[in-house]
Image: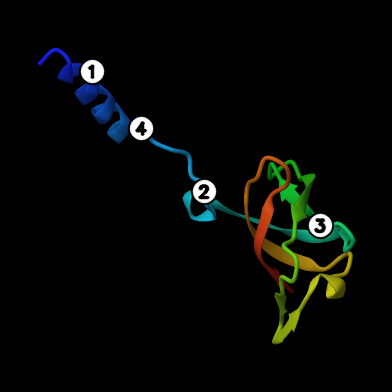
Amino acid sequence: MDKMLPIVFFVILGMMAVTPCDCQEARAMKVAEGDISAVDTFNSTITVKTLKYYPNLAYEEMMFSVPAGMQFVKGTETIDIFDLNVGDHVTVKYYDDPVLPKVISIVVY
């Protein structure tokens, strides 16, 4: 019985262990709204200037990584990163990432 105790302990410990998930579904989706201040089609990134810390009217620029081939909605059109312009008002849904936040979707107004 004494030989079984360590085995049972490690089996229970293994069942209790939580492994980190690198899937996007496990992370909380976030939303940013603002105006595009930069579009880098070579590196597939956009920078959005958002209003933060209301009512102090402080602005923050956030850079986002745009997956290759991603398309966006602008009115009734479907567009890609080459059709985005500085000054376009957008709503960006994204997941945080250690390097750059990853875009899920962009709606252009």
- Foreground mark, 4 or 1, reads 1
* Residue under the point 23% across and 23% down: 7
Residue 35 occupies quadrant:
bottom right
Of 15 and 76, which appears nearest the observer? 15
Residue 6 occupies quadrant:
top left
- Foreground mark, 3 or 1, reads 1
Determine the CA span between mark 1 and mark 2.
35 Å
Near mark 4 (Cα within 10 A), the count class, few <14, some 14-19 or many ≥20, is few
Query: Which residue is label 3 attached to?
Result: 45
Percent coordinates x, y for residue 99 in the rendering: 72, 42
Going from N to C along the chain, the mark reached first, 1 or 2, is 1
Q: Badges 2 and 3: C-beta atoms under 8 Å apart?
A: no
Query: Which residue is label 4 attached to?
Result: 17
Near mark 1 (Cα within 10 A), the count class, few <14, some 14-19 or many ≥20, is few
Going from N to C along the chain, the mark reached first, 2 or 4, is 4
Residue 7 in the image: above or below residue 81? above
Determine the CA span between mark 4 and mark 1.
16 Å
**Residue 75 got which mark?**
none
Query: Which residue is label 1 attached to?
Result: 6
Determine the CA span between mark 3 and mark 1.
52 Å
- Foreground mark, 1 or 2, reads 1
* Residue under the point 63% across and 56% down: 94
The secondary element bearing badge 2 is classed as loop
Residue 63 in the image: above or below residue 74? above
Q: What amino acid does circle 2 point to?
A: Arg
**Residue 27 got which mark?**
2
